[in-house]
Image (cartoon, grey):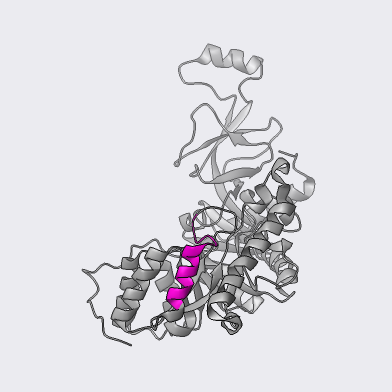
Amino acid sequence: MLGQTSSDEAYFKKISQALAEVGAYQPTLVVDKQRLDHNIDQLMSVIDRGFDYRIVAKSLPSLPMLKYIMARTGTHKLMSFHMPFLMHVVESIPKVDILLGKPMPIHSVRLFYQWRKQKNIRFNQSRQLQWLVDNLERLKQYESLAKELRLVFNINLEIDIGLHRGGFECDDVYRQALTLIDKSKSLRLSGLMGYEPHIGKIPVFLGGSEKAFRKVKTDYRAFKYSIVDIMGEEALTNLTFNTGGSSTYPLYTQPDIMNEIATASALVKPTDFDVPSLKHHKNAAFIATPVLKVIDKPEIPMAKKLSKLMHTFGVLPSKSCFIYGGNWLAKPCYPSGSKCSGIFGHSSNQEMYDLPKNCDIKMDDFMFFRPTQSEAVFLQFGEVAVYDDGRIIDWWSVFEPCKLETTSSIKTNNSPE
């Protein structure tokens, strides 16, 4: 890890002071609003080339945060990955346009419509919802349910453009799916979704990222040609051709094949996204937690003499600390050079960290971490502290962990809308 600069130290001390002023002496997820805005501006420089933008809700699981980004980017489109969160968003943002980011079991889809009917949610599924379907068997399941409910489902087909995580290949089975949709009175093709995070991870000996990106576009084009072959050129009108991700969105220069980009993690840039394509983005999310104890010359339990010898040879650190909580999907970033101690290992209660010899951190000071990802980490802290120019200006709630309603709690009602 590179050494901490004076500007870094001043930055984290300012956040520490802001947290202290509001009494946030517990593990806290902090989002820097100015850095978030900077990252949104970087994203919009690509979106403004002619793409639609869809926010990946799982990566920023906070309704106030999503609303803020929707307002700042001018989009009403979200991608949802979890049925309870889909229900929450549908109930809270009536005009939202949703594309499912992964295929849902048919039983979950049925429960969604039962819930919507019982709650009397004013949400136009025929205009605002696209179900993602990855294979022919699931497509037939969706058609059967749509017929039963006397509805028309919008179907977005998941296509494999190189990731090989599932989805349709451009083959006869895909053409069968298109033909089924074309002839069905209960299904409507709403578009395609091709995810391509593998682009930046292809080694040079296999052609590297440039070759991978060219192939992604070639493959996606072939899927579109199949639509034209079976449904006609006019079928492409108003379809959603979704792609992109946080590490790949900057690659897209014009909406010639794909017309919609989905991303979200790039807006807060956790460590998993420290990649060359996002070098223009800033780290905007941190975990701040109080230091409970500072220990000089920490010792191995039951090994006082051995510990002294290990200190003599520099094997043990000269200073360590115990923090409030720990064991998050995160990496320490302040004080610079801190690392998880090998003496006690990981702990979710009081995790021990080795500190640099010249570190002056004290009890009740704050230690900072960068999340490795946002989607799981954000949900662990209850509320997000919004930091702006030296102050905590707001608290953004996160989606509450919840289980999907079951048939025992929702009255079955298969009547039409």
Image point 56% across, 25% down: which residue?
298
Tell me if residue 299 is in the magenta stretch: no
Location of residue 357 with respect to 348 vertically, above or below: above
Q: Is residue 219 left or right of residue 24?
A: right
Q: Position of residue 221 (x, y in %)?
A: 64, 67
Please tell me which residue lies in front, 46 or 316: 46
The answer to which quarter of the image holds residue 30 is bottom right
Q: Is residue 69 left or right of residue 406?
A: right
The answer to which quarter of the image holds residue 309 is top right
Q: Position of residue 79 (x, y in %)?
A: 52, 69
Q: Position of residue 171 (x, y in %)?
A: 52, 62
The answer to which quarter of the image holds residue 310 is top right
What is the magenta segment's predominant secondary structure? helix
Q: Tell me where the magenta segment starts and ends, as one range.
A: 166-181
Residue 397 in view, yes or no: no
Quarter of the image that includes the C terminus? bottom left
Tell me if residue 176 is in the magenta stretch: yes
Image point 72% across, 47% down: which residue?
208
Q: How many marks?
A: 0
Residue 140 in view, yes or no: yes
Please tell me which residue lies in front, 379 or 165: 165
Q: Position of residue 389 (x, y in %)?
A: 70, 64
Please tell me which residue lies in front, 189 or 199: 189
Quarter of the image that includes the N terminus? top right
Please tell me which residue lies in front, 89 or 341: 89
